[in-house]
Every structure is written in structure tokens, then in C-alpha cells.
Amino acid sequence: MIKFALLLTVYIVVSCILFLVVSNTIAGWIFYLFLLMPFYGIILLICWVASWQNRRKKYQFRHIKYWIFGMVLSLQLATLLVSPANCYGFKQGSRCYSNLQVILTDVPRTGFSNAPHWQAVEDAFFGFLLAYMGSLATGLLTIGKFNENENL
């Protein structure tokens, strides 16, 4: 169980760094620091408490529903793509361009742009972030089975 907790901790740290680096904007960081970080902290706390209580027990990975973790990674990628990338003029009430628009069009990573905003993509950020968090929690709940007869 301790190995699983370490693996989950590495995944969360790498995900956290990836989210913050890819969305290096004030708007993105507000969502990540005040919504995603506490969620990650709660998950790690629950995981480490459960791992410490069951440290001699072994996970039965045959109970994992791998399609859920495929959905978790897909939603994480979608969240990264729709997250804010260029928030020039955000303080003056301007919208933020998404990473997807920065990648696919000529919108610069920083600075002013006259390109029209992809509002449907930009507005989907919060929904994708919540869907990612929900799928991660669901995925972790599916692997809560361990073998009580087999010790490490």
C-alpha cells in the first residue's frame, strides 16, 4: 500500500506542476490554487492515512477499472488544452485565450492579439476541471480493494 501511495503522490506532484506550468496565467492559477490544490491535498491525505493503516496489505490490481483511468487522463489532457494561456488585458475585463487556440492559431503566448476568442472552448475550462476532479476521485474509489490474506 505504501508503494501505491508513493506512486499516487508522484502522479499528483507531476500533474500539479504540469497544470501550473501550462497555464502560467492569473486566471488559471486562481482555479488551480484554490480548487485543484485542496482537492489534491484531500486525496493525498486520505490515501496516506489508508495506506498507513493498511501498510502490510497488498492492493489487488485486478479490481482496477482501467477505462476510468483512461478517462481521467483524457479529461486531464482536455483540461490542459482548454485552460487559460494568454490573459493579456485580464485585469481590464478581457477574456483569456485557451491553450488550444494558442497552439492551433497565431495567438501569441503573451501579449496583445486581435484574434477572436473561442468562447465555447474558453467557457469549457471550469467544466472540464470539475469533470477531471470527479473522474479522478471515482477512479481512486474503484481501487480501494486490497487483499487481507496476503501480507507483503
Image: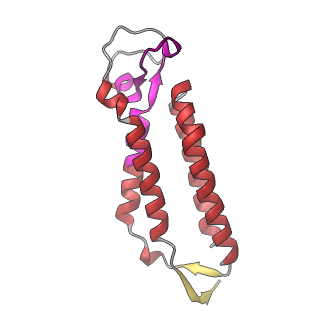
Quadrant position of residue 6:
bottom right
Q: Residue at x 40, y 49 (%)?
A: 131
Residue 3 versus residue 97 in the image, above or below:
below
Q: Nearer the viewer, residue 69 or 28?
A: 28
Q: Residue at x 37, y 57 (%)?
A: 70
Residue reaching furthest to the bottom: 149
Which quarter of the rendered picture does the C terminus lie within?
bottom right
Which quarter of the rendered picture does the N terminus lie within?
bottom right
Instruction: State the image coordinates of residue 95 (x, y, percent, origin top left).
Output: 41, 19
45 drawn magenta: no
Q: Nearer the viewer, residue 137 or 106?
A: 137
Residue 131 versus residue 98 in the image, above or below:
below
Residue 104 versus residue 46 in the image, above or below:
above
Instruction: State the image coordinates of residue 134 (x, y, percent, origin top left).
Output: 44, 54
Quadrant position of residue 77:
top left
Residue 25 visible from this viewpoint? no
Q: Is residue 39 left or right of residue 107?
A: right
Instruction: State the image coordinates of residue 14 (x, y, percent, origin top left).
Output: 58, 46
Instruction: State the image coordinates of residue 98 (x, y, percent, origin top left).
Output: 40, 26
Q: Which residues are magenta?
A: 75-103
